[in-house]
Amino acid sequence: MKIYGPPREHPPAHVHVEVGRVGVVVIRLALADNPLRVWRVHGEVDDATVIEAVRLVEGHEAAIRAAWERIHG
């Protein structure tokens, strides 16, 4: 997983989950009124791998959000 910093990155809070050399799943972190969700899928990523990426982020969402806030304020 990667969180990129400014100036490349931008809100809303999200994380890039790299899938080997075949693609990336971009997942937006939960907001007050919206749950965590898949934002974009780049490359050749199958549905099972997207689900696995979501579960990975769900399991670490608090730490990911804390890292996002340290980087982006």
Image (spheres, rainbow, N blue to C red):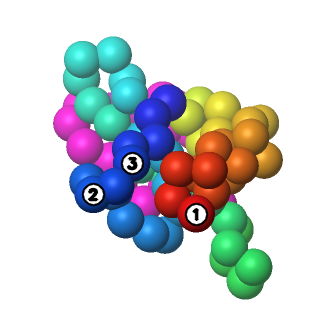
Which residue is rendered at x = 37% and y = 65% of the image? Answer: 10
Look at the image and tell me in which quarter the C terminus lies. bottom right
Magenta-drawn stretch contains 19? no
Of callouts 1 and 2, which one flags the residue occurring earlier in the amino acid sequence? 2
Q: For residue 73, which numbered disc appears in the image?
A: 1
Whole-angstrom CA distance, mark 2 to mark 3, is 6 Å
Given residues 40 and 30, the one toward you in this image is 30
Q: Give the residues in magenta.
A: 36-51
Residue 44: x percent and y percent?
24, 32
Mark 3 Cα within 10 Å, few/some/many (few <14, many 20+)?
A: few
Write down the residue under mark 3: 5
Residue 62: x percent and y percent?
78, 47
Instruction: Say if 51 sits above or below 9 in the image.
Output: above
Visible residue check, residue 37: no
Side (left or right) of 17 relative to 56: left
Look at label 1 and name its amino acid: Gly
Whole-angstrom CA distance, mark 1 to mark 3, is 11 Å
Within the image, what quadrant is residue 18 found in? Answer: top left
Given residues 45 and 28, the one toward you in this image is 28
